[in-house]
Amino acid sequence: MRYRSDRLDITGDGMPPSANSGGWRTIGGRVAAEWLVLALVASMLVAALVLGRLTERLDYIVYDHALASAERAPPDDIVIVAIDNRSLEEIGRWPWPRHIHAQLLDRLAEARPRAIGYDVLFVDPSPDDAMFAAAVRRNRTYLPLVIDVPGSNGAAYDIATPSGPLTAAAAAIAQVNLHFDGDRVVRKVYLEEGGGGRSWLQLGAVMAGLRAEGGGGAGPAGLHQARPVLIPYGGTTGHVPSISFVDLLDGRVPPELLAGRHILIGATADGLGDSYATPTSGATSQMSGVEIQAHLLDTLLRGDAITPASPGWQLGLALGGIWIVAFGLLRLRSRGSALLAVAVALSIVGLSFGLFRFANIWLPPISALLGLLFVVSVAAWRERMRLRQTLLRERIAAAATEGELQAARSIQLGMLPPRSDLSGFDPRVDIDALLEPARSIGGDLYDVIRIDADRIAFLVGDVTGKGVPAALFMALSKALAKSVLLRGVPNLADAAAILNQELARDNGEAMNVTMLLGIMDLSTGELVLTSAGHEDPLHIGADGRVASHKLDGGPPFCIVDFPYPEERFTLLRGETLLLVSDGVSEALDRTDALFGHERLLAAIAGRRSASEMVEAVRDAVRVFENGTDPTDDLTVMAVRYLG
């Protein structure tokens, strides 16, 4: 025993924006109902947290940190007489004959201490009991009992008092039961425990002059437990002054060190007696039971024992915070509600630490803070939903204003991987790509896909047609291409054939798409390419020389079944493959001249990184067009092998 809604409007409550720019300020029927439901659900949540003690571990962490900031000087009126390793070496194996304890008490009597308490059990009879009892009587000594749960012969518990004459000789009998929290740390004791009409105080409480009151709540096995306190440990293990048992016995301790002080005698030797984790003993150290009793005694003598707040007070704190913030959500604008929530949270923390520091009351704050967090999170989610609906309405209005083409542009660009993702795709390859839609939308696409740890797939495509149909077919083409490439098809030629079949099956608009597909082994730089009617790529050597890499390929997808060939070659370290759509080579200026191959070569001359190349091509095309509206999408991808 040491023991949402199918008719949701922009603001979310049926009111125009000007009436509810703050979220929940207008008190309408639905808003009031939502507010009430939120408050009630939050209330039930904190009730479960408090009554179920679900935040106990987190509260322990907060309490321990608060305790660590309140260390105090060692007590000057308490001394531990330690049954330590040296005492065992010099006196002998434990247990010792009780006449040795009698001699120690008589030695203590010479120093005239204020009180003596033993944290050692003497429940078994001994031949020296009479001698020891006389010394106990002469020196006003407090002795402990033990409560065993369960008891013998089916009893709920047994109470074993000191043996023979020791019980009558002792100044009082005390209990030394310590109780573990859920993390096996000793923070709390019940000053009073008992059963069957009897009640005993803690040893430290008896020595501090407290009296038993009786009663209390039911504890384990029908024992009553009363007057719980948290021990505000003054420091780490060894904080309380101590002397060795054998030094005192042999007269090597000056009497003035003990005079007028409270003396606690107990075991601290390795493997002897009890030791426990405490908030201040550290992660790898423990504190002996006798030193815990010394900290309790010091606490009671100083009058600064920490009283744990009842669950009712914890629940009241949490409910108060929840309903204040919930009412603020109903009455205040978003900024005001946020400031109120912060103020309430700070108040909860301040109240908890203020009570701890100045009133010796521990009111755990975690349940209240979690309830507050729940209310604020739900309110923030609701505000995001309101803003999302507003944004959706704005986008719908913009699409209606700009028409079909803008919607198509949104579809197209929304399907592409962000350039920021490409820049960090893999340290062995430098990839960048960009797509700038023409006003009429031509359905270009690109993608980069990781197949496994060493292989990536990349593609650039161009759908025939304009507007939303082209954008939708572009989305379908990209999705199907990715799906096929990730199926584990043995080779790229088979993947191209499957993709051609899949696109043709779902092609109600009789569109087609050109596409260049590639798979690259990042460990070797080996490339496998297949072209379905697309522009040939450019091969840029590490020295900057550029050559067009001719591919046999086949027709665009969705025209005819075709055995698309695989074509292999290897990129050496520092070499680049540049892929473009016909929006580059067939770009027109004001005289209807074509941008052409030579201008493309000039644009990439001297460029090293993938980003420099794609941006240089884009910039060169735009300068060439000289303000002319592009007639087709512009897509550029650069794949530079770094090895």
Image: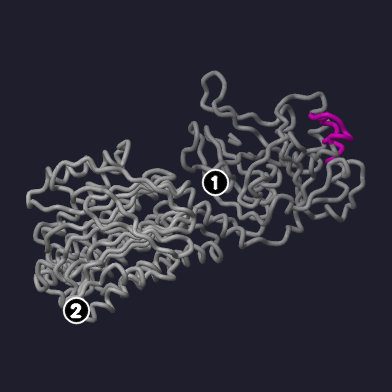
Q: Front-most of 80 and 460?
A: 460
Eyeballing the image, is 365 above or below 199?
Answer: below
Q: Is residue 281 magenta?
A: no
Amino acid type, residue under disc 1 in the picture: Glu
Q: Residue 451 at what x, y percent from top left?
A: 36, 44
Which residue in the rendered view is the most extreme toward the top?
153
Disc 2: CA contacts within 10 A as few (<14), some (14-19) or many (>=20): some
Q: How is the image coloured?
A: one colour
Residue 159, given in percent of the width and then of the height, sits at 60, 30
In magenta stretch: residue 96: yes
User: Label 2 amino acid?
Assistant: Thr
Query: Dot 1, how many residues are within 10 Å of its Cα: few (below 14), some (14-19), or many (20+)?
Result: few
Is 307 placed above or below 90 here? below
Q: Position of residue 362 (x, y in %)?
A: 51, 57
Q: Earlier in the sequence, mark 2 or mark 1?
A: 1
Percent coordinates x, y for residue 504 in the rendering: 13, 45
Residue sitting at 41 percent across and 66 percent down?
Answer: 345
How far separated are the C-alphas under marks 2 and 1? Answer: 96 Å
Q: Residue at x 79, y 39 (%)?
A: 83
In the figure, is residue 3 to the left or right of 424? right
The residue under the point 51% across, 35% down is: 223
Q: Which mark is residue 628?
A: 2
At mark 2, the secondary structure is loop
Q: Nearer the viewer, residue 60 or 486?
A: 486
Write the start and end of the magenta stretch as one range.
88-105
Residue where numbered disc 1 is placed: 213
Q: Main secondary structure of the magenta part?
A: helix
